[in-house]
Amino acid sequence: MSPQEIIKKYERALASQDWGSVEPLMHKDVCVTFSNGTFKGLLDVKAVFESNFASIKDEEYSISNLHWAHISETEAVCLYSFNWKGVIEGELCSGGGRGTSVLVFEGGQWQIITEHLGPNAS
């Protein structure tokens, strides 16, 4: 699978709100930065993803405007826009911003080792 296919699979996995679909796409040393902090390693990342999944019901998640800044045989860097909407505590909510994902090719597969999500630039 190519880095581009991994990001498409990642988008579908996030939309499913199923950690079991997300985890195989993550490197064991993954580091994720969200608006509420930076989470390092699979256990911390799993906890924050599952917390997000539990708090947002009927979530729709999408990634668009992908820009591949770098792709080599062992690393890839992708910048993109993300959007989500869902129900939080009974109210329809939505959000979005810019993301950066860094993928590495190890053990015959591509995995996300770093993801940084933040607000759109002003």
Image (spheres, grey):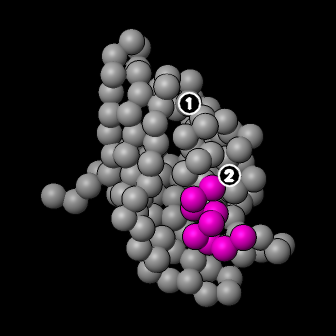
Q: Amino acid at mark 2?
A: Gly
**Position of the N terminus by quadrant:** bottom right
The residue positioned 57% from the left and 59% from the top of the image is: 8
Q: Magenta segment range?
A: 1-9
- Using residue 106 as the reference point, say whether residue 64 is left or right of it: left
- Using residue 108 as the reference point, say whether residue 85 is left or right of it: left
* Viewer-side residue, 73 vs 8: 8
- Using residue 4 as the reference point, say whether residue 79 is left or right of it: left
Q: Is mark 1 in CB contact (under 8 Å) with mark 2? A: no
The residue positioned 68% from the left and 82% from the top of the image is: 74
The residue positioned 68% from the left and 51% from the top of the image is: 41
SS for dot 2:
helix
Q: Is residue 31 visible?
A: no
Residue topped by disc 1: 53
Which picture quadrant has residue 21?
Answer: top right
Q: Position of residue 3 (x, y in %)?
A: 62, 72
Residue topped by disc 2: 41
**Mark seen at residue 105:** none
The residue positioned 41% from the left and 73% from the top of the image is: 67
Q: Is residue 30 visible?
A: yes
- For the stretch drawn in magenta, the main secondary structure is helix
Q: Position of residue 75 (x, y in %)?
A: 62, 80
